[in-house]
């Protein structure tokens, strides 16, 4: 297999996108790109600078000053805003909500679109988010849509948050997640939706390993088809 694919992974919060995309990328020797981290960085800045997420001009100005870099470190990929490591700060629940609010602004989406396309340039990438298969890379080679029940997604997110300071209750985590799903799916610009040609994987009853194995089987099938198509063209 010579051609390095673009693999899009979309779905709601807590569906298992990040963990499975990271492992899938590792198994394939591909880059892993977490696009939610970009929206979270804008959300973090909006919170810290008291910017109203409904104020288009102010939020867009934050994007224009955004100096973001994903840096691979021994412990994993870290996100830097200028010289500041914001990897942990962007995971806070209030940043999740703010990221969801600022991401509804078309000006923000437009500005981050070119960043995401640049990060996926040349292929060999597993990119996860909400609109990767529909807007960022509508011609992606493989598109996955991961989903799970709200209860299971809430439990997973709660388990992650419990490890951090200032954890909320399970009920609060689930309420906030449902709010975020609703906002992300109902927005006018690039809402969360399944691409017509996406492979749907319900992860509710699957372990992380099982999810990764499922994704990998699909990718291998697409690779075989791409190789065959290439072969046929050469014949
Ligand atoms: O994937 P995440 O939970 O880290 O994303 C945080 C928010 O960012 C999410 O609620 C909506 C927004 N987002 C988006 O609108 N488009 C993407 N491709 C990724 C995230």
Image (tube, grey):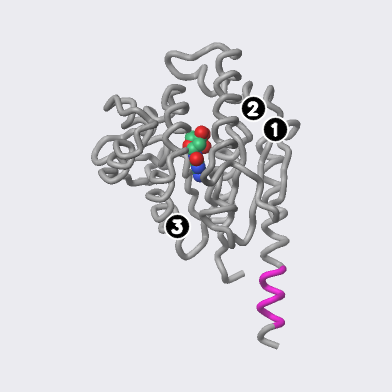
Q: Few, some or many C-alpha atoms within 10 Å of disc 1 (few <14, some 14-19, many ≥20)? A: many
Question: Mark 3 — residue?
Answer: 117
Gap between marks 1 and 2 measured at Cα:
6 Å
The image position of residue 78, as x and y in percent, is 38, 39
Could you tell me which residue is drawn at 60 percent across and 19 percent down?
Answer: 174
| Residue 7, image x, y percentages | 58, 55
Q: Which residues are magenta?
A: 225-232
> Which numbered disc flags the more N-terminal residue, 3 or 2?
3
Q: Which residue is at 43% across, 40% downward?
A: 105
Position of 222 relative to 171 (above/below)? below
Q: Secondary structure at mark 1?
A: loop
Dot 1 or dot 2, earlier in sequence: 1
- In three-dimensional space, the C-alpha distance between marks 3 and 2, rounded to whole angstroms, equals 28 Å
Give the side of residue 109 with respect to residue 80, left or right: right
Secondary structure of the residue carrying tag 2 is: helix
Q: Say whether residue 229 is magenta.
A: yes
The tag on residue 104 is none
Residue shown at the point (43%, 45%) measured from the top left: 106
Task: Tell me, yes or no, whether the two marked residues, 1 and 2, touch with CB atoms within 8 Å.
Answer: yes
Q: Which mark is residue 148?
A: 1
* Circles 3, 1 touching at the beta carbon (< 8 Å): no
- The image quadrant of residue 94 is top left
Q: Is residue 53 visible?
A: yes
Disc number lying in front (3 or 2): 3
Between 13 and 89, the one nearer to me in the picture: 13
Depth order, front residue of 58/140: 58
User: Is residue 22 visible in this depiction of the protein?
Assistant: no
Q: Which residue is mark 2?
A: 153
Considering the whole magenta stretch, tell me its main secondary structure: helix
């Amino acid at each position: 297999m010579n051609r390095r694919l673009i693999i899009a992974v979309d779905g709601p919060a807590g569906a298992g996108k990040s963990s499975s995309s990271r492992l899938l990328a590792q198994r394939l020797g591909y880059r892993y790109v977490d696009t939610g981290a970009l929206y979270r960085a804008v959300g973090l800045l909006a919170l810290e600078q008291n910017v109203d997420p409904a104020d288009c001009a102010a939020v867009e100005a934050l994007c224009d000053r955004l100096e973001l870099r994903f840096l691979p470190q021994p412990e994993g990929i870290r996100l830097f805003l200028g010289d500041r490591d914001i990897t942990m700060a962007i995971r806070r629940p209030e940043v999740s909500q703010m990221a969801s609010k600022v991401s509804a602004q078309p000006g923000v989406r437009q500005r981050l679109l070119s960043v995401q396309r640049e990060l996926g340039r040349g292929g060999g990438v597993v990119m996860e988010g909400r609109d990767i298969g529909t807007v960022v890379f509508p011609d992606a080679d493989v598109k996955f849509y991961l989903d799970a029940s709200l209860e299971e997604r809430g439990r997973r997110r709660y388990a992650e948050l419990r490890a951090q300071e200032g954890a909320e209750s399970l009920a609060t985590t689930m309420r906030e997640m449902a709010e975020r799903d609703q906002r992300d799916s109902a927005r006018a610009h690039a809402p969360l939706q399944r691409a017509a040609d996406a492979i749907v994987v319900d992860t509710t009853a699957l372990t992380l390993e099982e999810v990764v194995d499922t994704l990998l089987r699909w990718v291998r099938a697409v690779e075989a088809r791409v190789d065959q198509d290439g072969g046929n063209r050469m014949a």
